[in-house]
Amino acid sequence: MGLTMGKDTHSNGARRVVVTGTGVVTPIGNDVATFWSALKEGKSGEELFFELALEDLTRAADLFRPVWDRTRGVDGWVSLEVSPLLAHDTNRTLAAARDLHQRGSKTNLFIFIFNLKE
């Protein structure tokens, strides 16, 4: 099932939204199949977030790669930020950035490390 919305006009001219299904948007999946599969596997939290984010971003990187090639890396980047929970641990932040970059394995995937002032 998925969420499908359409606009309809009531006989009095008022617009209304018609919902024709149900869906799910959660940190452990944006569709019913992914959501239930992740639950069954016991996944949750940041581990699952980064897994799903990398799936989406590697697809986006593929879509933007021709732009990256044409502009020689000026445009066509996609980015993902390392967990802000690691902000005060330099070694773990760098390890996470390296891990995400390796797992994403796209030339135009930029792993961002947030800069916090102490």
Image (spheres, grey):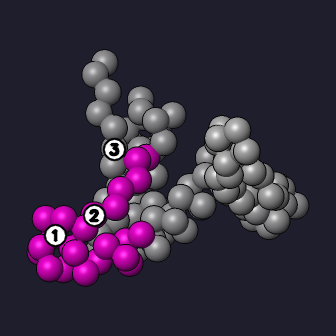
* 15 relative position to 18: left or right: left
* 20 relative position to 95: left or right: right
Q: Comparing marks 3 and 2, which lies closer to the viewer?
A: 2
Query: Who's the residue at 40% across and 47% down the image?
Result: 81
In magenta stretch: residue 73: yes
Query: Who's the residue at 46% across and 52% down the image?
Result: 96
* 75 relative position to 87: left or right: left
SS state under label 2: loop
Which residue position holds label 1?
Answer: 73
How far across and down, in percent of the image, does residue 60 sit? 42, 69
Query: Who's the residue at 19% across and 65% down the image?
Result: 75
Compared to residue 84, the image places residue 55 above or below, namely below
Q: Which residues are magenta?
A: 60-82
**Mark 3, residues whose alpha carbon is within 10 Å: few (<14), some, or many (≥20)?**
some
Amino acid type at mark 3? Ile
Q: Is residue 43 visible?
A: no
Q: Earlier in the sequence, mark 3 or mark 2?
A: 2
In magenta stretch: residue 101: no
State the quadrant of the C terminus.
top left
Q: Earlier in the sequence, mark 1 or mark 3?
A: 1
Q: Comparing marks 1 and 3, which lies closer to the viewer?
A: 1
Which residue position holds label 3?
Answer: 113
* 79 relative position to 18: left or right: left
Query: Who's the residue at 18% across and 80% down the image?
Result: 69
Closer to us: 11 or 25: 11
Which residue position holds label 2?
Answer: 77
**Mark 1, residues whose alpha carbon is within 10 Å: few (<14), some, or many (≥20)?**
some
> Answer yes or no: do the residues labelled 1 and 2 have beta carbons within 8 Å?
yes
Amino acid type at mark 2? Trp
| Label 3 – label 2 distance at C-alpha | 15 Å
SS state under label 1: loop
How far across and down, in percent of the image, does residue 34 sit? 75, 64
